[in-house]
Image (cartoon, grey):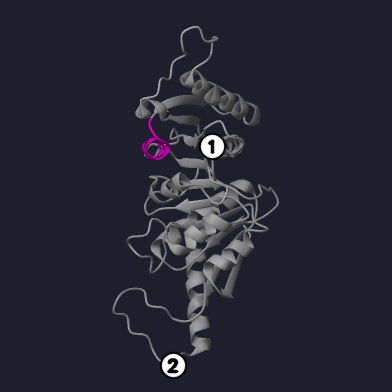
Amino acid sequence: MGSSAPVVVGVDGSAIALDAVRTAAREAASRRRPLRIVHAFIWPLMRVTVDPAPGAPAGAGLRNQAERYVAEAVTEAGRIAPEVAVTGAVVDGSPAPVLLAESRDASLLVLGSRGLGGFAGLLIGSATVQLSARAACPVLVVRGESRADGPVVVGVDGSELSTEAVGFAFDEAARRGVPLVAVHTWLYPAPLGPGDILPLVYDLEALAAEEERVLAESVAGFAAQYPDVPVQQRLMRGSPAGVLVEESKTAQLVVVGARGRGALAGLLLGSVSHAVLQHAHSPVAILHHGRTTVGS
């Protein structure tokens, strides 16, 4: 994908979406890419009148309101990153389909955790989950606390997608000028698919050595490509999701693959990535197979 592929951010007039715009502007600046701000305008699908009623004040009507959402976001993005070329659009359709289509030509899709109409009892919006699972580019979900002094944390499990996530995380750490923390967790052998036969007796020292090898090999090649990025390798006993959520308390970004080893085909997101997306204390980047765009 060329350097003209934009960073895309969805807006809906909410404060959460405006936070996402600020993050997207910074990401576009650091990547030297344009920023595209999109509002999914659902009302025509609902057969609702979107133009001002007769005799209404100038600027009334749902479409004018949508245009104001985008204009406000464009102004805010220009304030945050004046060097970035910013465009805005109101696109007819519901949020998930509109932003999925936008992701096909994007280098990164930035989303708020929840927008207008989000139920207080939900930890993260359903559209955000769908887009995190199905977007055609990496997805950055703005949630938790945005900080400039923490490391980039990446979950490692030895899968092909995990390797892509590690590469993305190295690139993020290099551009941000911060260390990378590569985390690999293990408990005991687990079946990776139907019919797997597991041993009845485990050699814990041998298991630990094997898991350490998986972690080391996952970062070795990228460490050579990014010699200026300090790397910490953390091999830990415990639940992958629990460990990554704990690490997110001091991270400025957590990077995970959409699905890891043993993920069930019917799940939108793997259990680990879904749990991290729901509970992380920092922004979360979700990676998909063959959809990683790094560098400028």
Residue ID at (59%, 46%): 175
Determine whether, in the image, residue 288 is placed left or right of residue 56.
Answer: left
**In the image, residue 285 lies at what x, y percent?**
52, 51
Q: Is residue 82 above or below residue 166?
A: above
Q: Amino acid at mark 2?
A: Val
Residue ID at (48%, 69%): 217
Q: Nearer the viewer, residue 66 or 77?
A: 66
Magenta span dominant secondary structure = helix
**In the image, residue 62 lies at what x, y percent?**
48, 21
Residue labelled with disc 2: 201
Task: Bin the neighbour count of mark 2 within 10 Å (Cα to Cα): few under 14, some 14-19, many 20 and up.
Answer: few
**In the image, residue 292 lies at what x, y percent?**
43, 49
Furthest-right residue in this view: 149
Residue labelled with disc 1: 116
Task: Bin the neighbour count of mark 1 within 10 Å (Cα to Cα): few under 14, some 14-19, many 20 and up.
Answer: few
Mark 1 or 2: in front is 1
**Residue 82 painted magenta:** no
**In the image, residue 277 lies at what x, y percent?**
52, 55
Q: Nearer the viewer, residue 9 or 164?
A: 9
CA gap between label 1 and label 2 equals 53 Å
Determine whether, in the image, residue 143 is placed left or right of residue 213.
Answer: right
Highlighted range, magenta: 93-102
